Amino acid sequence: MSASPNTSYSQLAEALKVRIESGGLKVADRMPSENGLAQDLGVSRGMVQRVYGVLEQEGILDRSQGQRRRLIAH
C-alpha cells in the first residue's frame, strides 16, 4: 500500500480496512508503529494517528497503555 501526496486520512483508513478484510492483517496482530507506517507510506505521523484513532473508535483496533495497537475485529 502506498499513499500519494493527496491521500486523505479517510482514504488511508479505508485502504487499511481493505487490507484487514483481505486477510493481510489478522486479529491480534500488532499494527505498525505510527512512525514506521508514516515513513512507509510517505505521510505524516499525524495522519497515521488520526487513522488509527478512527479505527479505534470503530472497534477495529485496540490499544493498551504503552502498547502498540492490535487488530481486534475484522
Image (cartoon, rainbow, N blue to C red):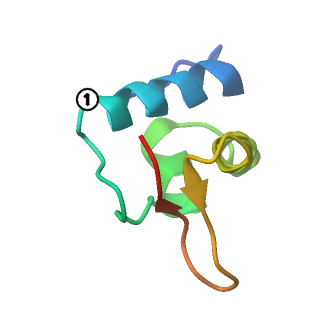
Q: Is residue 38 above or below residue 64?
A: above
Is 51 situated left or right of 70 in this image?
right
At 43% from the left and 45% from the top, the residue drawn is 40
Q: Secondary structure at mark 1?
A: loop
The foreground one among 51 and 74 is 74
Residue extending furthest toward the top: 6
Q: Is residue 40 above or below residue 61?
A: above
Amino acid type assigned to the residue bearing label 1 in the image: Ser
Residue with the mark numbered 1:
22
Please count the marks in the image.
1
Quadrant containing the N terminus is top left
Tell me residue 33's x, y (percent).
52, 64
Is 74 situated left or right of 11 in this image?
left
The foreground one among 59 and 10 is 59
Quadrant containing the C terminus is top left
The foreground one among 61 and 73 is 73
Residue extending furthest toward the bottom: 66
Picture quadrant of residue 8 = top right
Tell me residue 27's x, y (percent).
35, 56
Tell me residue 26's x, y (percent).
29, 52
